[in-house]
Amino acid sequence: MAAIRVDAQAIHVLNWTITRRRWNELSLLVFMLPAMLLVLAFVIIPAAWAIYISFTNQALIGPNAQNFSFVGLENYTRLFADDEFWNSLTISFIFVFGSAFLGQFLIGFALAVLLKSSGLLSRGIVGGSVLLAWVIPEIVAVYIWASVLNFQSGSANQILLLLGLERQRWLIDTPLLSIILVNIWRGTAFTMLLFSAALEAVPKVLYDAAAVDGANAWQKFTRITLPLIRYTILLDFILITMGTFSVFGIVFAMTGGGPLGRSEVIGVYIYRVAFEYREIGFGSAASVVMLVINLALALVYLRFIRVEWSEAR
Amino acid sequence: MSSSWWARHSSTFVFFAIILFLFFGPISWLLLASINAEPGSAWQVPQQITLNHYIELFQESEIVLWLRNSFILGIGTMAVTIVLSTLAAYPLSRVPFRGKSVLMYTLLLARVLPITAVIIPIFSISVRFGLVNRFEGAILILSAMQLPISLWIMKGFVDSIPIELEESAWLDGCNRMQGLIRVVFPLMAPGVAVTGLFAFLAAWGDFLIPLVILRSPTNFPIAMGLYRAFGNQGSVDFGFLTALAVIYSLPSIFLYLVARQWLVKGMTAGSVKM
């Protein structure tokens, strides 16, 4: 018993050591500062700044660039009365639904499932070409497709002619369909990769056990695979929805949002208002709407991964 | 046996064939046109193969300038991202402090923030600090966009280094900083490589930031050069543009091959424990 008797002096020394160590530890937080400052300056503050400018009549150049004034909710009332703004929201919605849900998700998922049970050769060639479309720079993808969809002699029309069909003015008559196709082409690899990894993680024993019980392939898929990867399905949906919502380069460089706004997603609308019409205040109001929509999606995302974290522990 | 195997798998093969046609077809056009003596927008097997488009590319001073600018952006962004995220990763992983989970959540939010929605204020801030048309400006912005995901990845790497390794260094007389430099930093090397690769790739392929920040033609990276070149409908030089697009793609393809085992980890950092 005497051995564990600790006198006050020792406790004092111990406390002091712990305090000093804790202080040393906290001083390490200084190393976080540069990274946090940069994110603050170019990501967080801009988001707050957009809200601030959206209540002003600031312009990109001219007298209203420096001496702008507060205009209250004027930008918002103008925005919500602007048909072009509603058009860009509708186009964005169709773009996300068509290219993320119908395209990237379904094709990427199917590819992951089918490639899992395929040989190395098809994995390498089929999976490889889907990946290739994803890894090349955005502008290269746009350049390739602008040439493929070229009216005069692009490959797409070449094939239509071979089949005895009429040539299509892809980027003029069906601009929205064109950018949806290009974005499916570009983004499918993301979903494919995500599900390939998720499918790899499903223990093989479960399938073996099901086989012993006489389950067929479809039963194995619906009873084992789907329940085990349901989080990945949700995660993929949220990530590709947010990703597609913020696509800019493909649309801007491919169609410029045209003709007549028929492929103008919200990002391109914001760019046009701010950098072509030079109305920073008004453009910021549209930015704030885009931020709010994205924040709503992001909160679903955060809520979802919080569940995921607590289950992983 | 053989026929039933075909029956079961034929639909899969048809699906694969369509996918291959749709995904590789357009890329094969690019490759073939770039070595075709008479290239066009139609898909064709070259009658005569030539490497002249590639050779002419490098005789054009503009291309060399674009390449140089893209490398400045890529390497600059890589350097800033690596240094800042390596510094921050250790305290983020090891030091408990109030508000840490809020901070990590905020970084996740920052990561999924659409850059187009904040491009106006980013431009305003760049004007205010004189960063427009300067590589420093573009590099800082690209790094800031890359940092949230980099910090998550790097924190994950430090999390996976057993604290016992550091503790034994402390017992051997190292203080915390020496332990950090001698034990932790060397083990962070793979994290540094992955973070650096991702940062380089993001900057190399980016279009929006050069479009808004690097406005003068002498500062154009390849993305802007290529965009401006094919945007000019008057002069469509297929050999030149296809060769340029291939050259521009090569570093991306190569670096993705190097980083391929980390792709999914990077995509889902913070989302799932896979």
Image (cartoon, coloured by chain):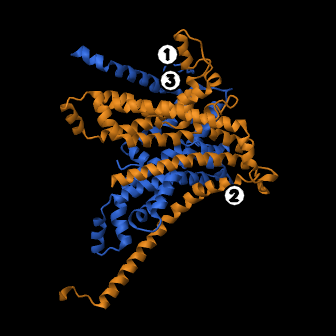
Chain colours: A orange, B blue
- Chain ID for label 1? B
Q: Position of residue B201 (x, y in %)?
A: 48, 44
Residue A200 occupies which quadrant of the picture? top left
Badge 2 local density, few (<14 within 10 Å), some, or many (20+)? few
Task: Quickly name the residue at label 3.
Answer: B29
Is label 1 or label 2 in front? 2
Left or right: residue A42 versus residue A74 is: left
Share a chain, discs 2 and 3? yes
Share a chain, discs 1 and 2? yes
Q: Position of residue A42 (x, y in %)?
A: 59, 55
Task: Quickly name the residue at label 1.
Answer: B47
Spatial distance from mark 1 to mark 3, Cα to Cα? Answer: 14 Å
Which residue: 33% across, 64% down? B183
Q: Is residue A155 visible?
A: yes
Which residue: 31% across, 91% down? A9
Q: Position of residue B106 (x, y in %)?
A: 51, 57
Disc nearer the start of the sequence (1/2): 1
- Indicate the secondary structure of the residue bearing disc 1: loop
**Residue that lies at the very extreme toward the top in this rendered image:** A164
Amino acid, disc 2: Arg
Amino acid, disc 1: Gln
- Front one among B164 and A234: A234
- Chain ID for label 2? B
Task: Quickly name the residue at label 2.
Answer: B128
Left or right: residue B149 versus residue A177 is: left
